[in-house]
Image (tube, rainbow, N blue to C red):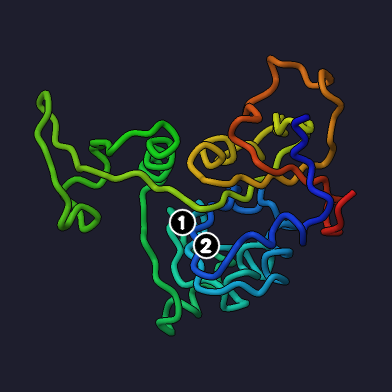
Amino acid sequence: MIDKRAGSLTEVLSQIKDGSTIMIGGFGTAGQPAELIDGLIELGVKDLAIVNNNAGNGDYGLAKLLKSGAVRKIICSFPRQSDSWVFDELYHAGKIELELVPQGNLACRIQAAGMGLGAVFTPTGFGTLLAEGKETRHIDGKDYVLEYPIKADFALIKAHQGDRWGNLVYRKSARNFGPIMAMAADVTIAQVSEIAELGQLDPEHIITPGIFVQHVVAVNAGQGEAQ
């Protein structure tokens, strides 16, 4: 019997080790798996490479993870906003490495990993510092930059509902990067607000099929405790 439900955050996160590359879903704080991030901090792993759209907001979630000193490198599109003081301080102190990736390229490179592609050519970044040292081509009258897939050991994502097979349904904009990150990681851990019975989820509403998810854990939002 397939049953991907995890008994606790500690149980499901304990497989993450020092030096792991981790994709974390979210667009700012929307769809960010805050309880999984808090559990990751409690785990005490170090030397992590994080893939996310942003580099943390305030002292919450991802920013809290950066502040803990667990992150060696972050790959993201928007490292700076008005409340990104944690990242700013670490970056200017030389305590964190940044790989800046345009947002469309970030999504495309994650998708390429999930689809098993070797690389993709994109026009975004051509002729800028972001293309320095990279292969370029002129195709059908346009200039392109070669970009490689972004893969991860783990993806930590948030969904609204999941079932014991790992099928996921998202809530509105909280969907963002979750579906493609689930495809691009060796192990996907999804926190959900509710675990539904098999057959309860409308197949037309399932965005991430269970084949891309290894663990589902239900948490009380803001509590970090498994239900």
Expressed as whole percent of the image width and height from the top left, the position of residue 94 reads 40, 82
Identify the residue at the far bottom of this view: 93
Expressed as whole percent of the image width and height from the top left, the position of residue 128 reads 20, 53
Say few, some or many: other residues with alpha carbon within 10 Å of mark 1 (under 14 / 14 to 19 / 20 or more). Answer: some
Expressed as whole percent of the image width and height from the top left, the position of residue 60 reads 69, 65
Query: Which numbered dot is residue 156?
Result: none
Which element is circle 1 on?
loop
Amino acid type of disc 2? Answer: Ala
Task: Between residue 141 and residue 23, name the one nearer to us.
Answer: 23
Expressed as whole percent of the image width and height from the top left, the position of residue 27 reads 58, 47
Mark pair 1, 2: CA separation: 7 Å
Residue sitting at x 56%, y 39%: 182
N-term-proximal mark, 1 vs 2: 2
Residue sitting at x 33%, y 34%: 117
Amino acid type of disc 1? Answer: Phe
Task: Between residue 104 and residue 118, name the one nearer to us.
Answer: 118
Location of residue 140 with respect to 37 vertically, above or below: above
Q: Which residue in the structure is indicated by mark 2?
A: 55
Q: Which residue in the structure is indicated by mark 1?
A: 78
Location of residue 67 with respect to 186 vertically, above or below: below
Identify the residue at the far right of this view: 227
Quadrant location of the N terminus in the rendered image: top right
Name the side, left or right, on which 152 lies relative to 160: left
